[in-house]
Image (spheres, rainbow, N blue to C red):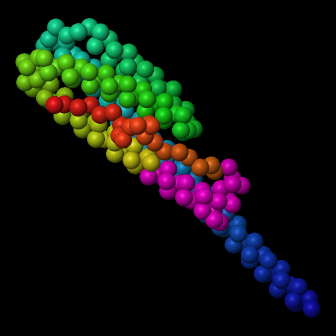
Amino acid sequence: MQQQKFSKYIIGGVILLLLIIYGVTTNNSLIQKREKINLQWSEVQNTYQRRIDLIPNLVNVVKGISDFEQTTLENIAIARADAIKGLSSGNSDITADTYNNQKKLQDNLAGAANRIIINIEKYPTLKGTAAYAGLQTQLEGTERRIKIARNDFNEAVAVYNKKVRSFPSNLIAGLLGFKKKEGFQADAGNDKAVEIKFN
């Protein structure tokens, strides 16, 4: 009789130990997936920063070769300043509002850059310069990097959300405060992000 009681305690202890091990491994897995989201978000920020850094070069090349419309250049300066503020105001908690705000600021900057590029068509001398051609290649590459970084971020969010919402890991996630996250979503009526286009 006493041996039966003892074996019940052993079985109960083993089950409890297995539950603790499962809880710890699930917690560690969720932390790794959340850190992957943070890493991918940093990559998105880096590509945004690259765009911000390249825009003044574009403006300087244009200013140096042509008598350009001052309002176009001022609009780019304002859009760039807003985009820089958006990057520096990022907090450690990545929310849908955080990246939607940054996306909006970056799209405004890309739109302003598009306006300057459209106006460049009026200046055939500028289009043929080596400085402009090199900058064009860099900006096109940056736009591709932004698209890839956003896709990688969304993929990391999807993997994390799958773990947070799947049974039985959702029980541990709920107990430890891991919440579902949102990825980049296209604005209503937009099929893709604003891209800087060279014709």
State whether residue 51 is above or below residue 81.
below
Q: Which quadrant of the structure image shows residue 141?
A: top left
- Which residue is more in the foreground, 189 or 92? 189
For the point 67% across and 63% down, which residue is it? 23
| 29 displayed left or right of 36 | right
Look at the image and tell me whether residue 32 can be seen: no
Q: Which quadrant of the structure image shows residue 81?
A: top left
For the point 39% across and 43% down, which residue is it? 150
- Which residue is more in the foreground, 145 or 182? 182
Across and down, in percent, residue 88 comes to: 47, 26
Quarter placement of the N terminus: bottom right
What range of the chain is rendered magenta? 155-177
Across and down, in percent, residue 18 comes to: 69, 72
For the point 43% across and 40% down, which residue is it? 186
Across and down, in percent, residue 185 comes to: 46, 42
Quarter placement of the C terminus: top left
State whether residue 173 is above or below residue 195.
below
For the point 53% across and 54% down, which residue is it? 160
